[in-house]
């Protein structure tokens, strides 16, 4: 029984770590939602696009090579150089900022004052657009991220827990890295929004668009900055998830893992995104652990497993019934 | 000059409250029905039926259903795929359990069952609003798909978990199964579409429809003037799910013939239907049809142009297709956020005044 | 009136592709986009390139040019239906839909339309019974052969006994992933090993729960029945928990370069089943290089020639082409139709001589097709990944699987299908 308990704890800790990975995606959502009121479905695709661009630049791929070849009958694939990792990251961030600027310029600016649902649908359109564009630019084959991220079981934790409990806990090094990066990101974002001028302007915009405008804050430049930061976070999420699975189309589907996190944590709260992610991560891992145990299967009459796709949503749904604005979301005040 | 009420005298209340008050509209509508019923079945072939017409009609039903919920009652739902799956599995269970039951009854009953499920998942809408509700309906989407994949009873314990629709006839013509003719399938669905559109049109302009719109525009205000939000929202969920369930049943039994739940009714289907009503026009019956037509025909057309006409490599064409569809969606939203139906309303307004602009 | 013009083009384009005579039409329902696009593209390239080779080198098959009509499905069933309807009127000889879901869809349709379908290593296993499924073929091997071959391989490694061992099956939670379960359950009873079933929902990016369970229960072997991103993550997670890679065996759809390369060195030693060879070490590939790739006619970039999935697509094309030859011989005409093609498939004999004549000796197993057996003998080999050399090597012969277990399952499942659909089994 004690062993089962340890297994449960291990599942919970791993859930916590996975939750952080979800939060990485959710963070970008929150930032954009706060600053521009846009529920950005394209966040997952941005992660894919960012990771694709990073690998492409690093390996010196020619963008749109296949398209160019098809039209002009040439046979180009790669430049002769390879870009060092740091420079490639910097260049990718540059690309994401240009992307943010284009989104503001061509999309958001034209949709000011529309219903949130319209903005939401526009970002789904954006997601389709970028899925196609990413494939067109860099090809649809599966790519490997080469940033020297350490993966695999963490020896120290395994040895230490083995000594204490007689059972070594498994924790993935990549998850630990992700957790550290998430902490750095949240601290950096908090510091940025508390102490820098731009950060204050950002908070002002999040608070009240019109009031911010009236004191001379440029809404447009704030949007570019926010989308740029969200692009950067998407890149981080893309790299972390891509390290596991290779960079490929399916990366864009991580959005679906982030949505319940948002519901739970509230659309407008950065700590909410992190804590929501952790609750979801722990919840789904522990739930799966319990229901896939044989005694539970006997109880309901069929083997219950692979619950993770829906558990997070149902948990968030039940939670929302009691607290409709999420854990840390702004209180919804309705006036007639 | 011709497109106006003047001269079209109404002699009874029934005439006064008809759907198409304008003569020209009315004739256009009758002409369309005539073509759909009497011309199309004679020119239809397997390709047009399978690639364009049948999916268009089925998606129209789904779009009508979602439009009732989202466009008229203001409750954004992303659970459409899951509810379609309910319809599909309900029809499968009914078809295999009661082999002698008429297919039309099966389809309608599937809709009723889906309505029941829809009401259950609609309950949280009393507390949860806006995007939170949209994401909450995803719970229905994922849970239902999981359920149908997991519990063997739903797929009659078949080894692979696929469901395959058996042969069923209507007036002696096969409408489901592999040897059903394109005409029979088309006409069967067309009858349902016309009937359902007629019901939707009359529901939405009656008392129920008005209470839906009141809730949509401002639910607290509606409550104050005496609209019961619980009842109204749940009725909207029920009616909407009824339509979507029928669409799901037809999608499975008549159109595809065999489905695998995760693939056929995945989250992408929910988005697809939402796209249809937003591009077509929220709160518009016509918009549901326009949106369905746009999103069914557009990809087929793009593919045929790029591959068949320009001879592009197939993968480039597929990727470009995504780019173009994404672009068109954004463009439509920028140019006319209220959908193509709004454009049509605008044109009608202009036409009424033509040639005198004031 | 630009819109009108475009619409007119579209209509013209859909209508224009009218059947061209004196051509052997092979529709290729491919998927180069979407979650499985990376895999689908390689298979489709292999298929197209082999047909191009036949045209360029031999002037087609028996003097009739081949034509591959490729249609993008994006792995979506509806688009598959659209593609099927769009191509079936073009004189399509055979369908190879490359998707288990789509196969289920097309089994009744192809039977109604009288067009054969070949599902090499996927689809519904019980179509091996040609008496019930006259139009569908799934030689040379199916999932149940695969499951049995995996068990045979484990038996061989353990001196013929798996008693008390535990085998975990990690499967894609779909029709495809569920296929091997009945066979494995039957085999578990015979050989007395424990079978743990671990479903993973599509897409399968997050598998930590499943792998923690593997880590806790320490199965002796793990089998992987995945597709797409699920494979890469599974192999990575297996490496993370230090599951011994040589005890981790994937089905043939979980054993391509795409699946192992992202995990890097950690994937070294991973095994997978296969029913054909890998690499380009066959005389045919020299021709392929000369007539297709160097001539700039390759469907893809030409870089993926010789990869597992490319070779599989090519092998599928080769089997179809051989069946055409058989059909041409049987009927004495070069321009065959779909019904003749079916007879050709049913009388196909692949021997050392045929393979040598193609320049692919030893590439795949030898087999004969008959009405009673549309599935071939189910000869399956095991290949292993060498991460240092970045290549797969076949480590066993093409070994037979345990038909005494599989045949009753095939008979039962096909009989159920026949009863459901009112088919009278008929051979000859």
Image (cartoon, rainbow, N blue to C red):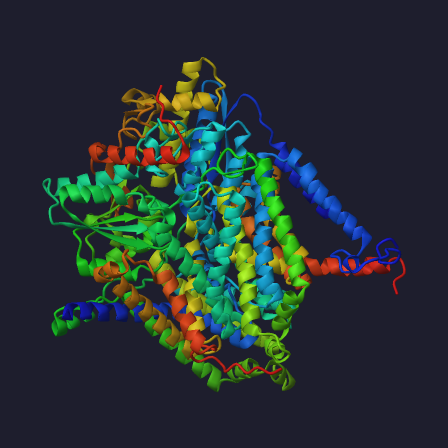
Give C347 or A222, whichever is nearer the viewer. Answer: C347
The answer to whether one can see residue C345 in this image is: yes
Residue at 30%, 39% (x, y): give it: C143
**Percent position (x, y) of residue A157?**
20, 71
Using the image, determine if residue C97 lies above or below residue A307.
Answer: above
Give C307 or A24, whichever is nearer the viewer. Answer: A24
**Percent position (x, y) of residue A130?**
52, 57
Q: In which quarter of the image is residue B1?
A: bottom right
Give A173 or B349, whichever is nearer the viewer. Answer: B349
> Is B141 left, or right, of B329 in this rendering?
left
Query: Tag count in the figure?
Result: 0
Pick out the residue farthest to the top. Answer: C332
Residue at 38%, 72% (x, y): give it: A277
**Percent position (x, y) of residue C215?**
20, 60
The answer to whether one can see residue C400 in this image is: no
> Is B77 left, or right, of C407 in this rendering?
right
**Percent position (x, y) of residue B179?**
50, 33
């Amino acid at each position: 029984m004690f062993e089962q308990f340890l297994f449960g704890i291990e599942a919970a800790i791993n859930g916590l770590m996975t939750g952080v990975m979800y939060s990485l995606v959710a963070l970008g959502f929150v930032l954009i939602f706060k600053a521009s009121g846009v529920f950005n479905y394209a966040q997952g695709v941005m992660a894919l696009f960012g990771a694709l661009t990073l690998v492409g630049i690093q390996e010196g791929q020619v963008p749109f090579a296949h398209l160019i070849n098809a039209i002009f009958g040439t046979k180009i694939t790669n430049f002769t150089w390879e870009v060092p990792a740091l420079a490639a990251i910097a260049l990718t961030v540059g690309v994401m900022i240009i992307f943010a600027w284009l989104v503001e310029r061509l999309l958001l600016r034209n949709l000011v004052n529309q219903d949130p649902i319209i903005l939401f649908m526009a970002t789904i359109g954006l997601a389709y657009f970028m899925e196609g564009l990413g494939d067109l630019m860099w090809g649809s084959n599966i790519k490997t991220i080469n940033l020297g991220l350490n993966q695999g079981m963490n020896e120290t934790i395994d040895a230490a827990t083995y000594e204490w409990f007689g059972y070594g806990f498994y924790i993935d090094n990549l998850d630990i890295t992700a957790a550290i990066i998430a902490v750095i990101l949240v601290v950096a974002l908090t510091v940025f929004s508390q102490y820098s001028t731009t950060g204050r302007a950002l908070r002002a915009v999040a608070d009240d668009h019109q009031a911010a405008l009236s004191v001379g804050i440029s809404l447009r430049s704030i949007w570019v900055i926010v989308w740029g930061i969200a692009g950067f976070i998407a890149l981080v999420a893309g790299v972390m998830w891509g390290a596991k699975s290779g960079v490929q189309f399916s990366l864009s589907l991580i959005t679906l893992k982030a949505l319940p996190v948002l519901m739970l944590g509230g659309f407008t709260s950065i700590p909410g995104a992190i804590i929501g992610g952790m609750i979801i991560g722990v919840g789904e891992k522990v739930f799966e652990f319990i229901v896939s145990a044989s005694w539970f299967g006997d109880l309901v009459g069929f083997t219950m497993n692979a619950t993770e796709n829906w558990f997070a949503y149902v948990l968030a749904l039940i939670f929302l019934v009691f607290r409709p604005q999420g854990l840390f979301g702004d209180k919804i005040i309705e006036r007639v | 000059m011709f497109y106006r009420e003047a001269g079209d005298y109404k002699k009874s209340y029934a005439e006064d409250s008809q759907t198409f008050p304008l003569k020209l509209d009315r004739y256009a509508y009758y002409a369309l029905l005539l073509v759909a019923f009497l011309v199309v079945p004679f020119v239809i072939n397997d390709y047009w039926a399978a690639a364009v017409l049948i999916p268009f009609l089925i998606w129209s039903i789904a779009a009508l259903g979602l439009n009732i919920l989202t466009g008229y009652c203001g409750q954004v739902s992303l659970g459409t795929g899951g509810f379609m799956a309910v319809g599909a599995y309900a029809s499968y269970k009914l078809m295999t359990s009661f082999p002698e039951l008429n297919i039309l009854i099966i389809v309608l009953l599937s809709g009723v069952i889906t309505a029941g499920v829809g009401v259950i998942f609609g309950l949280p809408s009393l507390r949860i609003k806006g995007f939170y509700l949209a994401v909450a309906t995803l719970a229905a989407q994922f849970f239902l798909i999981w359920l149908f994949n997991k519990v063997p009873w739903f797929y009659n314990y078949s080894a692979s978990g696929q469901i395959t629709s058996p042969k069923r006839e209507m007036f002696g013509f096969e409408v489901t199964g592999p040897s059903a003719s394109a005409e029979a399938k088309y006409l069967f669905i067309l009858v349902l579409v016309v009937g359902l559109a007629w019901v939707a049109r009359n529901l939405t302009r009656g008392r129920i429809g008005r209470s839906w719109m009141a809730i949509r525009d401002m639910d607290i205000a509606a409550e104050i003037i005496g609209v019961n939000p619980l009842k109204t929202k749940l009725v909207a969920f029920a009616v909407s799910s009824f339509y979507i369930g029928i669409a799901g049943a037809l999608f499975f039994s008549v159109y595809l013939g065999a489905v695998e739940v995760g693939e056929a009714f995945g989250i992408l289907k929910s988005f697809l239907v939402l796209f249809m009503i937003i591009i077509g026009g929220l709160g518009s019956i016509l918009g549901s049809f326009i949106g369905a037509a746009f999103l069914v025909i557009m990809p087929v057309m793009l593919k045929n142009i790029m591959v068949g006409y320009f001879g592009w490599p197939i993968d480039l064409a597929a990727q470009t297709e995504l780019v173009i569809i994404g672009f068109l969606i954004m463009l439509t939203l920028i140019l006319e956020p209220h959908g193509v139906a709004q454009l049509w309303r605008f044109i009608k307004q202009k036409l009424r005044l033509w040639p005198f602009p004031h | 009136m630009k819109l009108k013009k475009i619409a007119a083009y579209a209509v013209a384009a859909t209508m224009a592709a009218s059947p061209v005579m004196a051509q052997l039409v092979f529709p290729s329902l491919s998927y180069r986009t979407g979650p499985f696009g990376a895999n689908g593209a390689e298979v489709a390239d292999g298929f197209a390139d082999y047909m191009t080779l036949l045209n360029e080198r031999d002037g087609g098959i028996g003097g009739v040019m081949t034509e591959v009509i490729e249609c993008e499905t994006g792995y979506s069933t509806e688009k598959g239906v659209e593609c099927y309807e769009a191509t079936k009127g073009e004189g399509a000889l055979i369908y190879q839909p490359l998707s288990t879901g789509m196969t289920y869809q097309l089994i009744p349709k192809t039977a109604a339309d009288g067009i054969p379908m070949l599902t090499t290593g996927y689809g519904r296993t019980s179509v091996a019974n040609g008496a019930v499924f006259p139009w569908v073929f799934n030689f040379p091997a199916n999932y149940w052969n695969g499951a049995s071959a995996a068990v045979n391989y484990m038996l061989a490694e353990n001196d013929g006994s798996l008693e008390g061992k535990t085998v975990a099956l990690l499967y894609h939670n779909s029709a495809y992933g569920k296929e091997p379960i009945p066979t494995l359950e039957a085999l578990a009873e015979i050989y007395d090993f424990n079978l743990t079933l671990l479903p993973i929902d599509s897409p399968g990016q997050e598998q930590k729960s499943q792998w923690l369970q593997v880590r806790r229960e320490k199965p002796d072997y793990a089998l992987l029945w995945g597709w797409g991103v699920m494979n890469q993550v599974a192999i990575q997670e297996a490496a993370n928990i230090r599951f011994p890679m040589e005890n981790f065996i994937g089905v043939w759809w979980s054993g391509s370069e795409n699946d192992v390369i992202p995990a890097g060195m950690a994937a070294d030693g991973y095994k997978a089943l296969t029913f054909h060879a890998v690499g380009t070490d066959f005389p045919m590939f020299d021709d392929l290089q000369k007539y297709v790739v160097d001539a700039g006619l390759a469907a893809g970039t030409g870089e993926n020639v010789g990869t597992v999935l490319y070779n599989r697509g090519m092998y599928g094309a080769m089997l179809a082409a051989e069946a055409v030859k058989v059909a041409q011989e049987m009927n004495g005409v070069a321009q065959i139709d779909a019904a003749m093609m079916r007879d050709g498939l049913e009388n196909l004999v692949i021997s050392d001589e045929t393979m040598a004549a193609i320049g692919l000796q030893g590439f795949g197993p030898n087999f004969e097709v008959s009405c009673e057996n549309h599935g071939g003998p189910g000869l399956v080999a095991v290949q292993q990944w060498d991460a240092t050399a970045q290549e797969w090597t076949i480590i066993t012969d093409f070994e037979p699987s345990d038909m005494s277990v599989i045949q009753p399952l095939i008979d039962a499942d096909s009989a159920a299908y026949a009863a459901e659909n009112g088919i009278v089994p008929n051979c000859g």
